[in-house]
Structures are given as C-alpha cells and as structure tokens.
Amino acid sequence: MLPAAYQLPAAVVLLVGGFLACFFGYRLFKVVLALFGFIIGALAASSVFGATDTTPMVIAALVGGIAGAALLLAAYFVGVALVGAGIGALIANLIWTQVEGDPHPFVVILFSVAGAVLATWLQRYVIILGTAFGGAWTLLVGGLAIMGDSGPLKAAAQGDVWVAYPLNPAPGMTWLPWAWIALGTFGTVVQMFWTGGDKGRVVKPNKKKGLPKE
C-alpha cells in the first residue's frame, strides 16, 4: 500500500488512465498500454516494501511503473493478443464462479489462448471491448479512492481478489459489478460509434493502388 500522502495522486492516475482507456482506448492504444503498464508495475514493485518504508516504496513504485510501461510498449505488437487473452481469462472466471468456484488453471490457459487467437481476427472489437471494460474498472477504483474510500487502493496494493475480479466485490459493494458493466458498455458504445472510428490501428489495403491506407 502506498503512503497516505501519495494515495490521492495514485487515485488521480487511476481515474485519468481509466477514463482514457474506457472512452479512447482504441484511438490511444499505445498510451493506454503504457498507463496500465505503469500502474501494474508500480503496484507490484511497491508491494515489496512495508507501509513505513516510504522512500524505498516510492522509488520502487516509480522504477516498477517505468519498467511495466516499457514492457507493455515493447509488447505493443502482441498487445491485442494480450488483451484477448485477458478477456478469455475473465470469461473463464466468470463462468466458473457461477458454476463451481474457481476454474482449474488449465481451463484459464485454454480460454486465454482462445481469446488471443480470436483477438487477432477481431482486432478492432477486441481492443474496444478490452479497453472499455478495463478502463471502466480502473476509473471506478480511482473514483472511489478520490471520494475518500481508501479500500480500493489498499486492496490493489495488497492484491485483494475483488480488485482483480470485478464480479467478486468486497462486502458492502454488491452494486459495483453492475456499475462496472454499465460503464463498460457505455464506453464500448462511445468507442464503436464516435472515438474509435473506422481508422486507428488496423491498416487496410488500398484496392486501387495496392498500398496500405490509414
């Protein structure tokens, strides 16, 4: 968990990153990858130190965030497959949570591979869905933290399951999954019809000249 003095800036980063991902994820895919890489890297690195180790924790968060952003940017060309794999893993957990608890790791891997393969065929739609719902969740977590609820940042830093799995909310937050689904759906619609456009990251061939066009 980050020191109290740094929790508000961290919440602002989550809020801004979530907003950009939710409503402009397809158009700003590289930016979104860098932001989420920074957030994941910072949380992972800072969790190594205790709450009283303020300076080492902040340094670790910065170094980890930069490393995470660089890693996801380096994986830009397979970023769509990674998004598809993440969606596949989420679907597996959603199905098994409703049936018999946590899925077997092999099932999660199978769904992740299937999601990655499908993502390469349906690139634009997978990016939009993945960034809209991922951004919606990040936006909600950041928004709750800014409004004074320290639970999301504590849970994120400590690896609590409800932060990683939106459909398994913390006690007293049963409304959160529904808000996430509604916001993610709205973000998907906004990207599909406005901010996503028909251009973006997918290069289309020019039938007349045989050259790619934007």
Image (cartoon, rainbow, N blue to C red):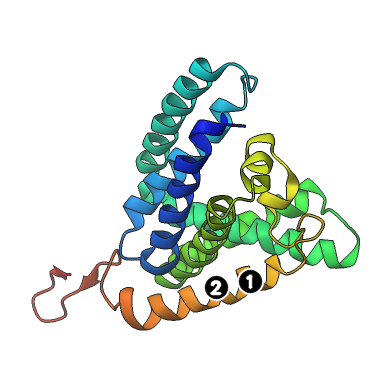
* Relative image position of residue 68 (x, y in whole percent): 45, 35
- The image quadrant that residue 176 belongs to is bottom right
On screen, 61 above or below 160?
A: above
Q: Amino acid at mark 1?
A: Ala
**x 62%, y 32%: residue:** 1
Mark 2 crowdedness (10 Å alpha carbons): few <14, some 14-19, many ≥20: many
Q: Secondary structure at mark 2?
A: helix
Quarter of the image with the C terminus in it: bottom left
Task: Give the residue at mark 1.
Answer: 179
Q: Amino acid at mark 2?
A: Leu
Q: Is residue 106 left or right of residue 126?
A: right
Q: Is residue 178 toward the left or the right of residue 27 in the image?
A: right
Q: Residue at x 57, y 60 (%)?
A: 140
Q: Image height check: is 182 above or below 154? A: below
Image position, residue 81 (x, y; %):
48, 55
Contact, mark 1 vs mark 2 (Cβ under 8 Å): yes
**66 shown above or below 19:** above
Instruction: Judge left or right: residue 173 versus residue 120.
Output: right
Which residue carries the number 2 mark? 183
Residue 213 higher or lower than 56, as above or below: below
The residue depicted at 21 percent of the width and 73 percent of the height is 205
Query: Farthest right residue?
Result: 100
| Residue 71 location (% of width, % of height) | 41, 36
SS of the residue at dot 1? helix
Where on the picture, by quarter, is residue 169? bottom right
x, y (%) of residue 98?
A: 85, 67
